[in-house]
Image (spheres, rainbow, N blue to C red):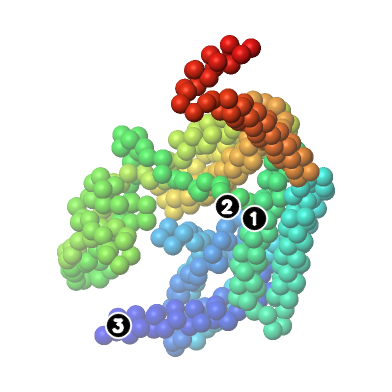
Amino acid sequence: MHRNVNRLHGLLAAALLGVALLSSFAKVNAAQLILRIKAVNPIEKSQPIKIRTNLPQGVKPEDVIDLDGLEIGYDVQNDVYYAHKEVPLGPKAVESFDITIKDIWVISDNRLEALGAQARTLVVMLAASESYNSANALRQQVEAGILKIREHQASNVIKPGVAAVQHIAAYEANMKALGRVKRDIGHLENLVLATGQDPGRLIGDDRRALRIRRDIELPESDYGTAVIQISVQNTSPSETRPIDVKRYLPSEVSPEDVLDPGGLNVATDPESGLSYVYIDDVSLEPGQEKVFDVKIRDKWNVNMPRIGALRNNASNLLSRINEKEAFTSIETSLSGMILELDKIEAEKGPAALSPDYVAFYRDQAKHLDEVEMKINRVRAALKPIEKTKKYGFKVKPPSMKTTWVVIWIILVFLAFLSLLFFLRWYGKTREEQMWTAVVKPGESKGDAESANMDTE
């Protein structure tokens, strides 16, 4: 009974901790946020309180300026970082911890200005094009979108009356608006490319670009082996107890990836789709600890084949761009992507399986996603280039005036041919009428011809 009471107090303390956390997310200055955590001991007895709170989604260790004595960990299951520590608290004691975080929920003004400048530059390049009017309308749409983002962002800066949650929600809405702006700029870039001009660094998006693919499969023999250690302990100093063991595996691991469950059973949760290992009623002596070594395929350190595939894609596109000769900016961008892939390949992660190991290779995969998006954008950009450039020659699309001149020339030519056909047909008809006029009744056309010859 005493143990149950202590457990209830611990749960209560954790609940109070969570409430305190939610009510204490405050702004420090234009570049920082404070995450205030309060640890509360609600009972009349000293006890250790375990602090653990997830950092906001997207926050990485490098975004944390000050942990205020706490430690940072990585939640493999939920793909988030968290702050944690066990602190001793006296009866009814309360202790606060302030975690200082960079305000990463802001779209920089420099980024917005670069997008606006790109739109204006592209429209100038299309001044002599038939696409100028539609391009100028897109520019106006881009500038209106940027203005809306700036205004929405300014009105949701954290201040009295604007909570951090509202600030983050505004950022997410602004990112969606930014996506629309980038698609409009991508359209402008494609219009410029179609005229055979170099639009500069491609910073817009293209709906036709291929989606990210992480489906490069390795042969089973090429996967490494990792070990997950699961330990359980009987904390009773005097009683033998049966202990149930259940541990969820990371989302990348399926039952087929479990090479050796180490004496445990393997199953899949039908609701979450996650795999787990378990065993019921492991009998442990007082104070006894038992460790299960679960061997699995290493599903994280698998990025090297993808790096090679992306490098080949970038190199192939670079060869195609070299043939065009006039797109130096795109050529430079592709060369930069290849260098970026080289740097990613040279990165060294942790040696043994751990939360840091999983975090490192997941972050590496996300970095590769960004590079792949850039490569796919260039591939999409080649389509308007190759529509107007054949065999290495620059061919600009004809103007509307030229198009109508060609159409009228074709129509006049067809009219002339029709006139010739009519005159030929008319002349032949007259000749046939003359022969018919000299044929007498009862004579054949051959007899008539003979008579005519005799007459002559």
Q: Which residue is mark 3?
A: 4
Please give the name of the residue rendered at 64% of the width and 79% of the height, measured from the top-left corner.
163
Q: Nearer the viewer, mark 3 or mark 1?
A: 1
Q: Secondary structure at mark 2?
A: loop
Taking depth in this image into account, of 374 and 5 the one nearest to the observer is 374
Q: Which residue is mark 2?
A: 207
Please give the name of the residue rendered at 41% of the width and 44% of the height, measured from the top-left corner.
215
Q: Upstream in the sequence, badge 1 or badge 2?
A: 1
Neighbour class for label 1 at 10 Å: few (<14), some, many (≥20)?
some
The amino acid pointed to by label 3 is Asn
Residue 452 picture location, percent across and down = 58, 16
Please give the name of the residue rendered at 68% of the width and 56% of the height, measured from the top-left corner.
184
Please give the name of the residue rendered at 67% of the width and 50% of the height, measured from the top-left corner.
186
**Residue furthest bottom as drawn:** 44
Neighbour class for label 3 at 10 Å: few (<14), some, many (≥20)?
few
Residue 136 picture location, percent across and down = 78, 56
Q: Are the residues at dot 1 and dot 2 in contact (C-beta closer than 8 Å)?
A: yes
Taking depth in this image into account, of 43 and 436 the one nearest to the observer is 436
Q: Secondary structure at mark 1?
A: helix
Vertical placement of residue 145 versus 163, above or below: above
Q: Which residue is mark 1?
A: 183
